[in-house]
Structures are given as C-alpha cells and as structure tokens.
Amino acid sequence: MGGINKDIKLIDENGKRIDGRSFNELRPIKIEAGVLERADGSAYIEWGNNKIIAAVYGPREVYPKHMQDPSRAVLRARYNMAAFSVDERKKPGPDRRSIELSLVISNALSSVVLLEQFPRTAIDVFIEVLQADAGTRIAGLTAASVALADAGIPMKDLIVGCAAGKVDNTVVLDLNKEEDNYGQADLPVAIIPRTKEIVLFQMDGDMTFDEVEMGLNMAIDAALKVYELQKDALRRKYINLAQEDEQQ
Amino acid sequence: MSKFTESVVSEIKRDYIQKLLSQGSRIDGRSQNDFRKIEVIKNFIPRADGSALVKLGNTQVLVGVKIETGEPFPDTPNTGVLSTNAELVPLASPTFEAGPPGEEAIELARVVDRGIRESKAIDLERLVIKEGELVWIVFVDIHVLDYDGNLFDASALGSIIALKNSTVPASRFGQGEDFPLPIRHYPATTTFAKIGDKIVLDPNLDEENIAHSRLTITTDENGKINAIQKGLEGTFTKDEILNTIKVSIESGKYLRNTFILGDDSK
C-alpha cells in the first residue's frame, strides 16, 4: 500500500474503525439513475465520501474508425478524476493509474453487455470522479453499470462490487481514505451478482491466503447488498417517470 | 493490429487447444501447471546498473535497471523511489505499434511494479542520501524483445533478478562507494489463463489468444500474497481464484528457488 506507516490506530479496542464502523460494515451508499440530460444513460453514486457520476453514450459510430470490430461493439470505459477530487490537486487528464483502471473497468462491463448485438459500434462509458475517498474504481463501476441499464443497453446482469482490505492486521470491508492510505492491503472485487462470477479482482499489499479468502467472501456478500441499491435506483427512476406521466 | 485475421486463425486452433485441454494436455506438450523452459542471463547489459535477459519458452524480455539521484516524493521524504516502465516495441510482435505506451504496456508495468513494491523487495529506506532532499531513484525498464505469450511472468522474473544483481552507482554521482542494491524480499509472479473451464499456468501465445480471462499473482518467500491482477473480459469463480492462488504459491517457490535465489541463471 502506498502510504507511510504512521502511528495511526485504525481500529480501537472495541473493534470500531475510525469512522465508527464495524469490520464488515459498508459505508452509506446512495445511487440515482438518469441524472444527465444529454447522455443516453447516466447514474450518480455517493459511496461514503465518494461522489461519482457515470454516463453512457451509444451504441454509436466508432471513432477512430480502425477501432471498430465487425463482430461486436467495442465498449470503452474512461475513468477520470477531477483535478479537485483529491487533497492535492491532480493534474488533469489520463495518468497511468487511470489508464489501467479504465482497462479493468472496460473488461468488467464487457463481460455482461451483449456486445454482439451491435457490431461496428462503440458504447462509450465515462466515469467522472468528482470527489475521491477510496474505492473509486468499484463505486465508479457500480454507477457505470446502472448508467448502462439506464441507457437501455442489453445486459446479462448488472455489475456490482465492493472492496475489502487489511488494516491493523484485521480484514475489513470497504476501506475509507485513511484506511486505504495507512492500511496493509486493498482488495477490490466486482461480480456478476446472479452467478457470483468474479469480473474484476485486484489486490495489493500483504495478505495470507486465509485473509484473501476472507476478504473475497466479505466483498462478495457486500456487493450483493449494493446490487439491491442499484436495482432500487433503476426502479425509482421508472416510478418517477410513471408518476410524471400520470400528472400530465 | 488486424483483429479480423487473428480471430480466424484462433477459431481454427481454438477447438484443437480446447480438445487437448479436456484430455489434460496442452498444445506444446506441457501439463496444466508447468512453465515453459526458462533461461536467464544475468548482467546481459553491463552498462546498466543491473539487468537480466529472460527467455520463457520463445518469449524474450530484457530488463534493465538504472539508478540515479533525485528528489523524493513529498509524502515519502525518507524513502527512495521505484519507477517501473514497460515498452512493447514493434520489433517484438506484428501486433505491437510504435508510440507511447498503450494500456497493455501500462498494465504490464503497473502489475510488475506492484509485485516489487508491495512485497517491499527493495529496502527503499536505505536509499536516502539526504532526507527530504536527495534519494536514489531506481528505474526498472522492461524491454520486450519477442512476444510469444505471458509477458507478465517473464518481465517480473527479469525485474527481480536484475534488481538483485544491481549496484547503486554511488561513485558515479559523487556519493561515496558503490554498494549492492539492498533487497529484502524475493517476489515471484505467476500468470494463469482460463480457457473454457480449464486454467493453465504460463500461457503461450496461442493459449493467450483464445483465453477468456487471466490471473496474475505475486507471492513472497513467506507464502504471503502481495499482488493480484485479474485480466481480460472473462470471469472466474471464487473457488477457481482460491485454487489458483494455492498453485501460484507453489509455482512461485519453483521460480524463486531455481532462478531468483538459485544459481540456475548465467
């Protein structure tokens, strides 16, 4: 993990974490579908102090043209952090981290989108991290899959995830920023919830086999809870639309 | 890159490779958890501060280490700096293009970097010249020469071997006598490809071309897990991941004992 090992106690004697959560508790999460006018589909997520917006454009023509695939659509996700999203201003534009995250997010979403139905087209997914507080790739991916559904793009299922990690020698769920900075390991996981197949899995830090197994189990269980929030966000959008219709 | 012609060739080979896998064998005669033949030449580039040429089957990767002085990062004033870069030069494959590193090269460099960094292989705290002002910066440059599958393992193996044989060129920078780069841990990286429902170690290019998903795992000499990267669009079940980690710990021991710590490299 990136940070310096300062003498910060991340878990107190009662097993509470610095934000008061227990080891396997998620941060508060809010998801809203259909938040942008111009995009074909969109979603906004607040996950702890993360604020992330995702938009989908397409299927549409592929530019540059040589990127097109005669057998299926190309799905291109772009993960981008706003300059003001982190403590120290981030230089705008893609860096190596965001290029890697864009790749693993594109791969994860491609596993469920029925790309064969739209040969020679592009499905563009844009993820803008407005405020970052650890776990942005998973929160962004979770929002992006709601945005794809909001755009009406056929999918086998949504994609949903959660990270586990290790702080103060304890495996915990859903690291916040301090835990991410000073913790010992980070383990982001994303799944296809109906089959529980794993579509995104990364890990860095220092964990035993048993700790990885425990973290993986905790992350999958938590992801299934977030899945309910995703479905609820999509349902709410259509209930709201129906009510507006009735009023007219 | 012509995706179209590639996929036609793959379609023909796909059935054959899958048929072999279902019978428990592979297109090049290996069993499921075998590496291809590995050959390592240490200090291939004497002008570098450390280097290693790794041949993994027909895949060839040259890793060079250069060590220079520079400023530490503001948030880590009392440690040296590690910087890992990978170049997929067009000499190595008809599918590689010249130009700045693409997403594949960046993923490769970042996964190798994560293995070295998270295992704390280099004792970066001993690379400080003046706290907050001047430290040693270790550049690991991965130069792919021949791409026949599994760049991750060839590059990671070359990197740790090159680092282990690196000298900090202190005299060149007027900072006293040269000294060996301090290495504390010996991470080993293993990559698996999932083809159908079979998972094989060290995929060659044919296997890589038809793989649905990929899993790269770095473990250290204590059996700890330091880095994992799942790649490609396919999926893994939880049990597949856990079983693969177990295989990785064992395969990592072979790499470490034979090539990283052992003397089976020239």
Image (tube, rainbow, N blue to C red):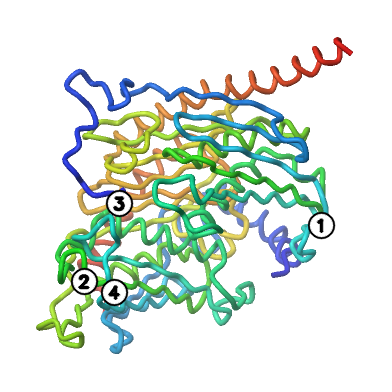
Q: Nearer the viewer, residue A13 or A110?
A: A13
The kind of residue on which mark 2 rests is: Leu
Q: Which chain carries label 2?
A: B
The kind of residue on which mark 3 rests is: Thr
Q: Are discs 4 and 3 less than 8 Å apart at CB?
A: no
- Quarter that holds the C terminus of chain A: top right
The kind of residue on which mark 4 rests is: Ala
Residue A70 has which mark? 1
Write down the residue under mark 3. B219
* Furthest residue in direction right, as rendered: A248
Residue B134 has which mark? 2
Identify the residue at horizontal 78%, vertical 45% (top origin).
Answer: A58
Q: Is residue B197 above or below residue A64?
A: above
The x, y position of residue A218, in whole percent, is 40, 26
Mark with earlier residue (4, 3)? 4
Mark with earlier residue (2, 4)? 2
Q: In this view, does A63 lie above or below A134?
A: below
Label 3, residues with CA under 10 Å away: few <14, some 14-19, many ≥20: many
Residue B162 has which mark? 4
With A208 as the anchor, is B63 left or right in this view? right
Q: Which of A243 and A226 is in front in this view?
A: A243
Identify the residue at horizontal 30%, vertical 51% (top origin).
Answer: B219
Q: Is residue A113 above or below residue B146?
A: above
Q: Which chain carries label 4?
A: B
Q: Which of B211 and A34 is in front in this view?
A: A34
Residue B229 has which mark? none
With B223 as the anchor, is B233 left or right in this view? right
Mark with earlier residue (3, 2)? 2
Label 2, residues with CA under 10 Å away: few <14, some 14-19, many ≥20: some
Identify the residue at horizontal 45%, vertical 38% (top origin).
Answer: A135
Helix, strand or loop for disc 3: strand
